[in-house]
Image: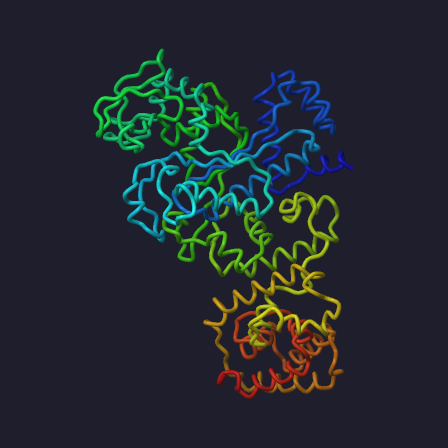
Amino acid sequence: MLQNLETLARDAKSWPFEQARNLLAHVLKKRLSDADRNAARLLIDAGKTGEALATFEALRRPVIFETGYGPSGLPHMGTFGEVARTTMVRNAFRALTGDHWATRLIAFSDDMDGLRKVPDGIPNPEMLAEDLHKPLKVVRDPFGTHDSFGAHNNARLRAFLDGFGFEYEFLSSTEQYRSGRFDTTLLTLLERFDAVQAIMLPTLGPERRETYSPFLPVSPVTGQVLQVPTLERNVSKGTIVFDDPAGGRTELPVTGGHVKLQWKPDWAMRWTALDVDYEMSGKDLIESVRESGKICRALGGVPPEGFNFELFLDIEGKKISKSKGNGLTMDEWLRYGTPESLSWYMFQSPKSAKSLHFNVIPRAIDDYLAFIEAYRTQEPAKRIDNAVWSIHAGDPPAHTSPVSFALLLNLVGVANASSKAQLWAYFARYLPDATPDSEPLLDQLMERALNYYEDFVKPTKSYRLPDAREKAALLDLADRLKALPGDTTDGEMIQGEVYAVGKAHEFEPLRGWFAALYEVLLGAAQGPRFGSFAAIYGLTQTIALIEDGAEGRLTQA
């Protein structure tokens, strides 16, 4: 069975498996000679990854994945997206190698970076203004919950990632610099200062070139991260000399957390010091990846494999910024959508720009549910390319929700429901054995539907009057439903009558008839499968709704 999974992974077409195969080739090239690489590849392709690892000692080190987070603002969806997508590649790599190869995912926070500006929408902004240019792990927490702004944002990120069940190791830039973990690579950069400058200076403007240094000393006087030139370097002592505006000419070691690096050299230093094998990034960082890769090589490292994903856009088509707060936060998504729907959204077309706004959530939920349904009947070669395989690491749930989110939204509106108890009452006949315990996802979707309807659907709901043909069709439908057994919960039977009415009244195409149902009865441009909706809402109530809509009473409510 395991070998079969490896075979499926080698042939899978979805992007996580493409990335996993690229990563495998990268790691083999990075760690082995040509001859050994060919021998190892033959074993891995034969489903004998364990034997390859036993044979070649260089392959026994874990494969390191990294994601980065800049905690100058609250965690946003792009941050989560990097971890989710990287985890998908990690899962694909495990399938490709039979899960023999140890992997690690490092979630790295650049919390030693200086706070450059006060983010929008933050309490106590005057406090942050007083702490500008200090390391984020030193800046006071305006929320009053942690010992620093960086610690607060790190905690927000970790709480969400933990809630999602991600496997990861959190590393703080401050702790890594201060612990000495980066010291060896920092001393190498000091020694190869001129080579790094030769890479960076051509990418800068004339004025910036005059003052640029890869080293950012932390002032012993003010505690600020200083953007100042390096005046002298003492490689044998491991120090730099600079002019501190608050303390004059100062000498500091580059080790032990006394300095940090500019972000491109810092990125390259991390790749080298942590031996990172894979890191993805946004399309806006393509040039930065290239320059950091050059610096990584100058430091004696090998840049990681990775790819560039497109950016998320707000409802106006503008790039989402964590400092502006113009996109959805993770907490906001989870108020209206499930965690699985968010992962589904992250899986889809990572190289295409996508809107990240409240209006994408209902479709994401129902698309996820549809993919789960499809997975049940797919052959193995199709299953492994189904998004839910990557979302659930090859083990998607066998059961999800018996109804769509769109249906629940309309049920909330028509029933004027304000609690899950009211919604569950409608399901008493349709699903008599269902309870919140037996249908936990349905219960979660009810809560989110109530929230979404109240905040977004209700304020924009607009019923219209039917025209003459639509009114006649609605009254015909009401009469036909009255002829059905009053206690029926057969959605297909009801749906058959809906179709029959549409054809009898010559709606061509039929979607015009369904549009009329949604706009006249539900006050929306789109809606759920009407038969299923009526079965849950109840035949008597549905007939009354249809008659009210036909007579224009809904527009007066």
List x then y, in percent, for residue 510.
Answer: 62, 73
Q: Position of residue 144 (x, y in %)?
A: 39, 48
Quadrant for the N terminus, please. Answer: top right
- Closer-to-camera residue (257/306): 257
| Residue at the (73%, 50%) spot, across then down | 378
Rendered residue at 57%/79% (across/down): 521
- In percent of width and height, residue 129 lies at 28, 45
Residue toward you, 523 or 134? 134
Closer to the camera in the image, 51 or 261 = 261
Please provide percent x and percent y for residue 540.
Answer: 67, 83
> Which quarter of the figure has residue 292?
top left
Residue most toward the top? 236
Note whether 350 is above or below 469 in the view shown. Answer: above
Image side of residue 40 versus residue 551, left or right: right
Residue 488 falls left or right of residue 516: right
Q: Is residue 251 above or below residue 87?
A: above
Number of callouts: 0
Q: Is residue 522 above or below residue 365?
A: below
Q: Seen in the image, is 266 located left or right of residue 499?
A: left
- Considering depth in this image, is 25 or 343 the residue closer to the camera? 343
In the image, is 231 to the left or to the right of 300? left
**Which residue extends farthest right?**
1
Quadrant of residue 264 within the rendered picture: top left
The image quarter in which residue 26 lies: top right
Which colour scheme appears in the figure? rainbow
